[in-house]
Image (tube, grey):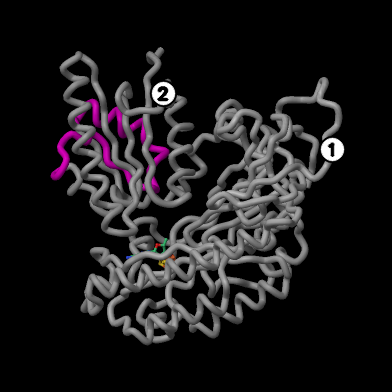
């Protein structure tokens, strides 16, 4: 029998990496690894990296510098620590990582996590192992599902990958190169995963994919199934009270998705729909395949499905060729749409992408100034959105105990954190909360109903509360 070993995973970047980290933990659990919170006492440290912007990629090398010191310390104490680099930097830079950071034992791309045990063996025998191919087999068929204990420990909200990769080739983006071509998982596998999570107390599922609404997995009838129809199927699973999905491309919003928002109370009225820019010239240079007017129309279609629907987005400022007018068009679009939240980034050229060949025209000062102006506008919209909740009664899905004694924290439909004083058995339930005040980004309030007698109340989430 293998002796117990400790595993520490540090994830950067998107939700897909958070999900992948859990799959790696589940895979290595079968090899006797249990998770540890710090790298100090770990036998294996995995850096699950992000390559979306230069800053994110460079973090990996500074972290590897720190890990080398820990690895040397461990060796001096007669203990072996191994270091693996996973994620999109592993995929994009493979051998370069070993050249720059010789302390690394394993480099593994996102499509090969199910091979981690073999790669660790190979590294033991050969000193080092690299795997960054895109294998033909579906890795999901080989990744073990999480055990009951692991699901319960991860809480009542879970991510499930339904689609991976991207065929859109936006000119600034590395994803089509690091995650490969679009692949959708079959409906029955996703249904099995979600039912298993629900059976173990999960109440909220976020379906994730790099381009999630391009989902077209095989349905029960053998034909491709859309994201809207998949959501419809998942909403029928007992125990699932909230459904979300991310990240969507504006061009792939079909009528089944709009209908899902109209018909499924479990589908949260909060859509992350990145637009990147409000200028048609820049959208074209980015190869986004739509205009600002197309995007507005898509937003209107969503709005026609539910009047309480709200949006978040991603923006890039300072893309090559972005003029002051182009940037003004972005501000105008933001003003017109009115977002509940949004993320904005300075353009970062990524090696191997078409935009990296374009002449950069926006000075560092202009980029900083545009980012600050855009963020100020977005912040003001977000504050107004949050303030509008004060005085209203909103549904909150309770997730865990808060920092203060007796406090329980949950989230509204719009992912705003909401805090109430209440007994712990409300975790896992959706309850109405009257919002009294706002503290930074958190809503504070009280339960808008009287709870039944506490004596004998279950402490674990009830499994019978369907959608
Ligand atoms: N530079 C800056 N931001 C980028 N993003 C993707 N690639 C780049 C890049 N090269 C942003 C986009 C995307 C989000 C995940 O990251 O806004 O939607
Ligand atoms: Fe990247 Fe998203 Fe464009 Fe795909 S759709 S290339 S993931 S920005």
Q: How crowded is mark 1: few (under 14 residues within 10 Å), some or many (20 or more)?
A: few
Disc 1 secondary structure class = loop
In the foreground, 83 or 323: 323
Q: What range of the chain is rendered magenta?
A: 99-127
**Is residue 21 in the magenta section?**
no
Residue located 20% across and 14% down the image: 78
**Picture coordinates of residue 253, whole percent (x, y):** 60, 71
Residue 282, by quadrant, is bottom left
As drawn, 165 above or below 89: below
Picture layout, residue 134 above or below residue 20: below
Residue 288 visible in the displayed image: yes
- Location of residue 271 by image quarter: bottom right
Q: In this view, does 394 lie to the left or right of 289?
A: right
| Residue 374 at x, y percent in the picture | 42, 71
Depicted 150 relative to depicted 170: above or below = above
Query: Does the beta carbon of the residue at mark 1 sit less than 8 Å from ligand 1?
Result: no
The image position of residue 280, as x and y in percent, is 43, 85
- Can you identify the residue that label 1 sits on? 450
Q: Main secondary structure of the magenta part?
A: helix
Decide if residue 167 is in sight here.
no
- The numbered mark at residue 33 is 2
Name the residue rendered at 42%, 29% in the picture.
28
Q: Identify the residue at horizontal 40%, vertical 25% (top origin).
A: 36
Q: In which quarter of the image is ligand 1?
A: bottom left
Q: Where is residue 89 in the image (x, y as percent from the top left)?
A: 29, 50
């Amino acid at each position: 029998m293998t002796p117990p070993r400790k595993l520490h995973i540090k994830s950067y970047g998107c939700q897909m990496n958070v999900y992948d980290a859990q799959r790696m933990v589940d895979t290595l659990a079968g090899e006797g690894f249990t998770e540890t919170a710090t790298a100090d006492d770990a036998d294996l440290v995995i850096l699950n990296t992000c390559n979306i912007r230069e800053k994110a990629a460079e973090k990996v090398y500074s972290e590897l510098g720190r890990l080398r010191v820990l690895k040397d310390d461990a060796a001096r104490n007669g203990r072996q620590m191994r270091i693996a680099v996973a994620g999109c930097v592993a995929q994009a830079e493979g051998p370069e990582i070993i050249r720059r950071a010789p302390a690394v034992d394993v480099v593994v791309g996102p499509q090969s996590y199910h091979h981690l045990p073999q790669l660790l063996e190979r590294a033991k025998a050969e000193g080092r192992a690299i795997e960054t191919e895109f294998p033909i087999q579906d890795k999901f068929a080989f990744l073990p599902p999480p055990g009951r204990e692991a699901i319960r420990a991860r809480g009542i909200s879970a991510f499930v990958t339904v689609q991976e990769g991207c065929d859109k080739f936006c000119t600034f983006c590395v994803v089509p190169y690091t995650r490969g071509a679009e692949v959708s998982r079959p409906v029955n596998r996703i249904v099995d995963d979600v039912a298993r999570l629900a059976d173990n107390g999960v109440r909220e599922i976020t379906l994730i994919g790099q381009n999630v609404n391009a989902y077209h997995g095989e349905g029960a009838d053998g034909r491709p199934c859309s994201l809207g129809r998949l959501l419809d199927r998942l909403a029928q699973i007992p125990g699932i009270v909230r459904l979300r999905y991310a990240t969507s491309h504006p061009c792939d919003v079909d009528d089944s998705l709009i209908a899902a928002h109209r018909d499924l109370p479990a589908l949260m009225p909060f859509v992350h729909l990145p637009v990147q820019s409000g200028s048609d010239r820049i959208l074209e240079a980015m190869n986004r395949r739509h205009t600002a007017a197309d995007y507005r129309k898509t937003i209107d279609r969503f709005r026609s499905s539910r009047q309480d629907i709200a949006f978040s987005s991603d923006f890039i400022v300072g893309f090559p060729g972005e003029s002051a007018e182009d940037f003004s068009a972005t501000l105008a679009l933001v003003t017109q749409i009115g977002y509940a939240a949004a993320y904005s980034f300075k353009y970062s050229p990524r090696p191997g992408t078409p935009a990296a060949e374009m002449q950069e025209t926006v000075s560092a000062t202009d980029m900083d100034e545009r980012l600050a102006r855009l963020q100020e506008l977005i912040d003001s919209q977000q504050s107004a959105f949050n303030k509008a909740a004060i005085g209203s009664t909103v549904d909150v899905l309770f997730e865990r105990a808060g920092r203060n004694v007796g406090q329980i924290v949950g989230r509204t439909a719009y992912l705003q954190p909401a805090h109430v004083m209440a007994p712990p058995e409300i975790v896992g339930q959706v309850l109405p909360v009257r919002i009294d005040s706002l503290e930074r980004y958190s809503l504070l309030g009280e339960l808008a109903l009287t709870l039944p007698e506490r004596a004998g109340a279950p402490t674990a989430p009830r499994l019978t509360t369907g959608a």
